[in-house]
Image (cartoon, rainbow, N blue to C red):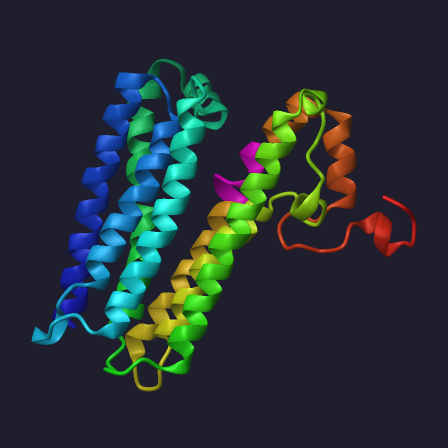
Amino acid sequence: MTTYLGALAVIALSLAILMALAWVVRELTGNSGWVDTIWTFSVGLVGASSALWPAFGHAPNARQWLVAGLVALWSGRLGMHIAIRTARISDDPRYAAFAKDWGLNARRRMFIFLQNQALGSVPLVFAIFVAAHVPEPALRVQDFLGAAILLAGILGEGLADAQLRRFRQDPANAVQVCDVGLWRWSRHPNYFFEWLCWLAYPVIGLASGYAWGWASLLAPILMYWILVHVTGIPPLEEQMLRSRGERYRAYQARTSAFFPLPPKAIVRGATA
């Protein structure tokens, strides 16, 4: 019990400090895109470190190294993608909209907002810790299954990002809506595969007689809520409706918001 509560406290403090740093970087650069970059690397750093936490007086075992490696791989891929994207823009439109709405209180409210992000990330990192510290020394089939799920999520998200990037590089698509490849089946396939990555931790962490393992379920539940109902889909779709109007409304009507499904026009037997 003490080990887990101690890890929880260290995780919370570490994320609070790192997201305070993200606020400083945002203030110095004026580019809120660096917030998401720092968040991704912060979760990766704290998550991998917590996975390797030498609990119960033992050196890290194979499962701890496996989970730490998976977290680092996820963080490195996504963090570099966001960093490259951020370097090409002056500001993230989602955060810019928040700052505009907050007016003169923008600096203070942005700091509070980022600290709330840190707090909301604690269950995610704790799920990593819990999965890594399953009290069984040998790797099990479900450990490899969890790893396969996370790798599938990374590959799927990378493919979705690449398809969107190629679409946007064509000047003819400047005012069009990306509906090619994975984006034909989901309006946010990158978010879906990001959520899939977090589903790996309960697959690894749930074990007979391991009560703490249930905490690993917090990761996919919380990530789904964040992506679908809070800072993921809602503000992005508002932005797309402002910039694409009826084109995006038509896209919404025929395409699943999150889970990849056949476009509705295909389901009805018509051509898309």
The secondary structure that most of the magenta stretch takes on is: helix
Q: Is residue 146 above or below residue 123?
A: below
- Image position of 187 (left or right of 70): right
Residue 117 visible here = no
Does the segment drawn in magenta span residue 8?
Answer: no
- Please say whether residue 229 is one of the residues in the magenta stretch: yes
The answer to which quarter of the image holds residue 262 is bottom right
| Residue 89 drawn at (x, y percent) | 45, 20
Q: Quadrant of the C terminus?
A: top right
Total number of numbered discs in the rendering: 0
Residue 185 locus on image (x, y percent): 70, 50
* Res 172 quadrant in image: top right
Residue range (magenta) = 228-237
Q: Is residue 146 left or right of residue 172?
A: left
Q: Quadrant of the N terminus?
A: bottom left
Residue 189 seen from this side: yes
Tell me residue 152's x, y (percent): 51, 60
Residue drawn 22% across the image and 41% down it? 16
Near-viewer residue (36 or 83): 83
Question: Which sits in the foreground, 34 or 27?
Answer: 34
